[in-house]
Image (cartoon, rainbow, N blue to C red):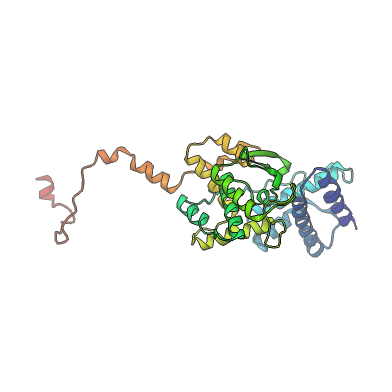
Amino acid sequence: MMWDYWLTLYLETHSAARGLRSSTIAAYRATLEGFRDYVRFRLEDKSPDRITAADALGYVEYLRRERDNGDSAVNRQVTILKNFYRAIVAMGHMEPSDNPMAHFPKVKAAPRKIPVYLSEDEVKRILSAPPDDTVLGLRDRAILLLIYGTGIRASECARLRECDIDFSNRTIFVVGKGGHERTIPLSKEVAQALALYRRVRGDIKHTGGFFRSRRGRIMSRGAVYERVRKYGQLAKVQKRVSPHVLRHTFATHLVRKGVGIVTISKLLGHRLVTSTQVYLHTTAEDLREAAEKHPIKDMVDKVVELLPDIKLPFQRSRRQKYG
């Protein structure tokens, strides 16, 4: 009973009061219920006020060894557990000294990986994949152009409303993570694609969702992901293509065009510019261009290819070498 009460208190009272999105709360619920199941079957169903740091460490070990979770997944679950117990203490249901996560050892941070991004040729192939003779084809092309042309997230694309697009000023209004709002300029090409889809789609309510399914419903985040994946496959792109990869590509291409990192950070909706610095990575193409600029090419004589039938001695004889 205490587990049910504390989970409800945290998820439906504390998290809701913080203004967290329903999807975020659902992710918290899944993590905490997973820990609850572990306690039920591995720790003889201990109540939440009797959990120790050793119990939490055992759970981390279980996640790594039996669930094959990586550093990123483990860190996320530990963070949620810490937030859960911190909230329980803050609401007066536990003494600070009894908090099992208060002095929990720091978990190894997940290594930061270079974002996967597409070449300009790969993007062109994807953008040309949707058919241009159907309403759904024009919708999908508008979605691809919008994500690549603005860097918005799949969820932001799915939530876009009719009233969020200002065609006269070529901007869109987006509500991002944490409810943070931003206005993003649209290129002429993106605005035209959106306007064309809007014309063939037909009129909808001013506050209605802009992108509609074949049945006229608002598109979901999952549907946006499925559309992008489909056209990546149709374009025969060997990399895994997703809305997030298009977002990475948007940022990487701007960096390579010399756009400042602070500007890119604002376009992406990052609260901290440090989150955007991951795009300041070098590519294989960048490395090759740098190598070609090295002055060694002006210092070494040209090597003439030897004829196939010419054989060289393994080394000079002592008499030839010193005589």
Say if residue 54 shows up in the picture.
Answer: no
Q: Is residue 35 shown above or below 112?
A: below
Which quadrant of the rendered structure holds the N terminus? bottom right
Q: Is residue 16 shown above or below 216?
A: above
Say whether residue 276 is left or right of residue 45.
left
Q: Nearer the viewer, residue 51 or 17?
A: 17
* Residue 48 percent location from the top left of the image: 84, 54
Q: Nearer the viewer, residue 148 or 17?
A: 148
Number of numbered tags placed on the structure image? 0
* Residue occupying the point 71% across, 44% down: 163
Q: Nearer the viewer, residue 30 or 227?
A: 227
Q: Is residue 68 shown above or below 11?
A: below
* Residue 115 percent location from the top left of the image: 54, 49
* Residue 64 percent location from the top left of the image: 66, 58
Q: Nearer the viewer, residue 299 or 97?
A: 299
* Residue occupying the point 71% across, 56% down: 218
Which quadrant of the rendered structure holds the C terminus? top left
Say whether residue 318 is left or right of residue 23.
left
* Residue 72 percent location from the top left of the image: 64, 52
Say if residue 24 shows up in the picture.
Answer: yes
Residue farthest bottom in this picture: 41
